[in-house]
Amino acid sequence: MAYIWPIGGGKGGSGKSFLTSSLGRLSAGLGKRTLVIDLDLGAANLHTLVGVPYPKKGFSDFIRKKILRLEDTVVETPFENLFLISGAHDNFDIANLPYEQKIKTLRAIMKLDYDSVLLDLGAGTSFNTLDFFLISQHGIFITTPEPTSIENVYRLIRSIYFRRIRYCFNVTDFKALEDEVVIQFGDGSFNKPECMIKVIADVYPEKYEQLQDVFSAFRFKLIINQVRKHDNAALGMQMSRMIEKHLGLHIEFAGNVAYDDHVHDAICQRVSFLDRYPCTRTACDLHEVGKQIVQPGGQQLMFRYL
Amino acid sequence: MPKGFTQLNYYEVLDIKPDAMAFEIRHAYNAALQVYQPGSLASYSFFPEDERQEILSLVETAYRTLISDQARKDYNEELIRRGELDVRKEAASAAKKPVSIFNIRRNPVAKVALTNNVTLKNKINQSQLIGDILAQNELCGADLKKIRMELGVLTEQIAQETKIRHDHLCSMEEDHVARLPAAVFLKGFVKSYLKCLSLEPVEELSARYMDTVARLPQK
């Protein structure tokens, strides 16, 4: 079964697509059959970054039922072992993927036969993004060392936490739960998953056990992208420690990736950054991060979509 | 059930062990400030303002309590009463002191008594083999080796005693002419060797050895 790495980051422009393409290249370079899927629905870019400017087919063909099986929408890229499901030339309402389509897609992704699958997710915290992120326990969060980006990544982490709790309840139970949290912890606290989980521990002990199992199986990682020289290199460690302490969620800090203007140049010239500038600090950082991503620990667990 | 932040004890708040030293406490306090103070990037937007103040004041109290010896002792007692701390762990380890890099007052290395001279001499007098060798007109390296073996001394011991390099000793005993040191050194070495094994008379024996070596074919 394929290892699935959803890559998300909350804020736009933090380098999700660039990192997806780079990590995909590194994984493919090691001889693993790697598939990158552009799930930034409605704002797809990944095809440009992996050197397929005009893909013949793509994800929307699967949604429009022009192509029945998701594996038939895969196109080859100029790089060996690297494959792409493109989001280019979508129909314009693709961003609002209906629920049934989403479930269908999630199931199809889980059945794909590749060594690793990287999902490039969109910005924001729409349900689509959250559900695609929760497809695997190996999610990767990306942020830049800027307050705006950090605010969004915290928001994404909390939303994912929430979404996972929400899976366990039906609408009425969840509403009751929210009310209970407000009674116990005061106004505004229904927004805090850490408060909610405490209430669940009291009210639904068996669901609490189940959720603890799920959360302890998560192997989320955090990458800080576009780190300038004068930025605090310890930021990632601090963030991961704080999330662990205050949210009780273990997110491993995977590394910093240095900022480099050459990334911009490479994208403008539409060449692979790793090929054009292999000896830059950024390329070295990508290799370091890639090592951790390519050799996953533990078994791939799947959330069951019934 | 993981505890909320406000229920953590002061050690857990600062992420230190109960036997942490003042230095570590100060360090942990600074690290915590970096994360929680209002301008910090790591906790930006993570807490509402009042919660941040609460956490900061908790960190502050934790630091002030732990850094003062008396307050820390009282707090430890309270933790022990609450059963959060083992009595054994609470006992502070002896304060670490600076360790000198060079121990100048070290004792001279106890001499590995090469068995004392008297026993060696007795052995020499008693041994038939050594008597025969010493009676010869020639004395080569192989003879020296035989004597040494007879006396039960190791080359390592001789090297330690005489400070002659071990490989020199070996080439002397094997009569490896090409590898021997220059004659002027060799003379001194063989004298030390003989003295070390208490063989007498040193002068005569060393001269005999030098003669023998001079006649050996160059390998």
Image (cartoon, coloured by chain):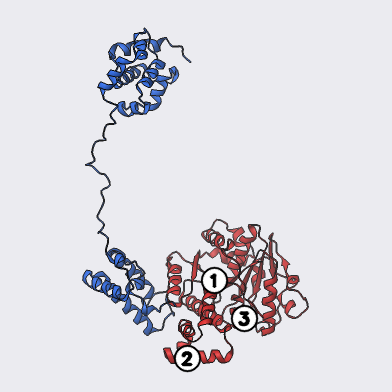
Q: Earlier in the sequence, mark 3 or mark 1?
A: 3
Measured as percent of width and height from the top left, residue B181 is found at 38, 20
- Residue A123 is situated, as x and y percent measured from the top left of the image, at 57, 78
Q: Are marks 2 and 3 on the same chain?
A: yes
Q: If you read the primary sequence from the N terminus, does the residue marked by circle 2 or circle 3 appear first?
A: 3
The residue that mark 3 highlights is A128
The subunit letter for the residue under badge 1 reads: A
Identify residue type, mark 2: Glu
Q: What residue lies at 26% left-to-right and 44% top-to-bottom?
A: B102
Residue with the mark numbered 1: A217
Q: Secondary structure at mark 2?
A: helix
Left or right: A88 as drawn, with respect to B125: right
- Marking on residue A180: 2
Asked whether disc 3 touches disc 1, contact meaning CB atoms under 8 Å apart, the reply is no
Chain A display color: red
Mark 1 to mark 2 CA distance (whole Å)? 27 Å
